[in-house]
Amino acid sequence: MARCETGLSSFIYIPAVCFRCVSKFAFFLLLLAPVSVLAADSSVQFPKTIAWSAYPTGTGGYSQAVAIGSILQRQYGVNLRVIPGRNDVSRLATLRAGRVHFSGGGSEAVYAQEGILNFASRIWGPQPIRALMSNYSDSCSFTFAMATDAGVNSIDDIRGKRVTFVQGAPSLNNATAALLAYANLTWDDVTPVEVGGYNASIDAVLNDRADMAGGACNSPPFLRIEASPRGLTFARFPHDDLAAVDRVRNRLPWYVPHTAFEGPTIPAEGIQVFTSAYPLLVGLEDSDETMAYSMVKVMHQHFDEYKDNAPGATGWTLDRQKFEQAFVPFHPGAIRYYKEIGAWTAEAEATNLENMHRQSILKAAWDKFFPTAPEEYSAFEQAWLVARETALAEAGLITLGEGL
């Protein structure tokens, strides 16, 4: 069985041949073999088809992937298959299984690196995530979209309101918990409404089962809330309340104060919120280096051609990569390109080494814990979280333990 660069298997039956036929048969095999698509720039190399996992159809991340895929098809003759995943686990499960080459998601990449939340289970644990590019758009990666008729005039008014809890989406739910912390609230102070996916959370607000849902400021489904009789209002998180800002960042250190300008009902002067990289394009430690290099190079060099073709796509610009503030290490293929264009600084290298060290601590902790771990699911998870926090604390690293 042969495996091609797209991860698909092909079976080749080799008949009995005489020695004089070998050269002809070898030529026949060359015709069948998968080949890379070479651009005019020979350093850019792709198979005929590549694949990303992304948020569901209609979201900003999915739309951006489609826009980038259009460039790949037009300029390089490469097909980009975008595989929608309704939750965090499904998006990264396809990456780990080799069904996609890269994943354009959100904070789930961090949670997978850390081996926490849904990734604390026996079949997951800490993953060797590698970043390629980050999108910090004029919108925001996550905030609260509220039904106007719910009467929430300030963040403190959220107490007691109905808030969507997306099954299998720890990044969304933990982000909700972090933003609730701004007002010194927890999930116990609101009414969780369980939904089966991101789009289902929008439906819950539209159907008056919930008062608010979390998502990116410019997420297209929020247009449905704006157009509904309930109306749309975004929560605001004033940055001058430093204690409140610290409460959010202590929970999610990769979230930063941000002014959002893009999104329905957002005024021209913008609103103060928090943001993180969304989408964050990632692969794994063993993702093909040439393909990672080529992907980053194409996305950078063709930025002007796709930046206006999907909501939030302007955030892929090079000057918003925030290498020095990254919380996961970058892929060697991506680093190779950033070094070529002089964008990879000494500070970026230092941060990357710190992130690589963090992953090595997590892997060592998992390898030590796993052989004698409890069998029962809940006991396994709780024991791992204790072992994980202990290892990180002993190494002098942030544990992210609060509320997990």
Image (cartoon, grey):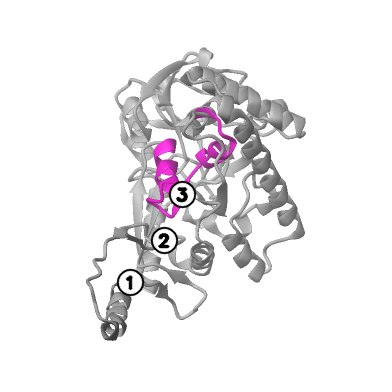
Q: Amino acid at mark 2?
A: Ile
Asked whether residue 53 appears in the rendered view, the answer is: yes
Disc 1: which residue? 33
Q: Which corner quadrant of the image does residue 36 belong to? A: bottom left
- Cα distance in 3D space between marks 3 and 1: 29 Å
Which residue, given by chain and number where applicable, does mark 2 sit on?
Answer: 68
Q: Residues within 10 Å of mark 1 (few under 14, many from 20)?
A: few
Quadrant (top left/top right/bottom left/bottom right) for the C terminus: top right
Q: Residue at x 28, y 73 (%)?
A: 32
Nearer the observer: mark 3 or 2; the answer is 3
Q: Residue at x 49, y 41 (%)?
A: 266
Q: Which residue is mark 3?
A: 104
Would you say 101 lies left or right of 251 here?
left
Q: Which stretch is magenta?
A: 88-117
Tag 1: amino acid: Ala
Tell me the element at label 3.
strand
Residue 272 visible, this angle: no
- Badge 3 amino acid: Gly
Q: Is residue 113 magenta?
A: yes
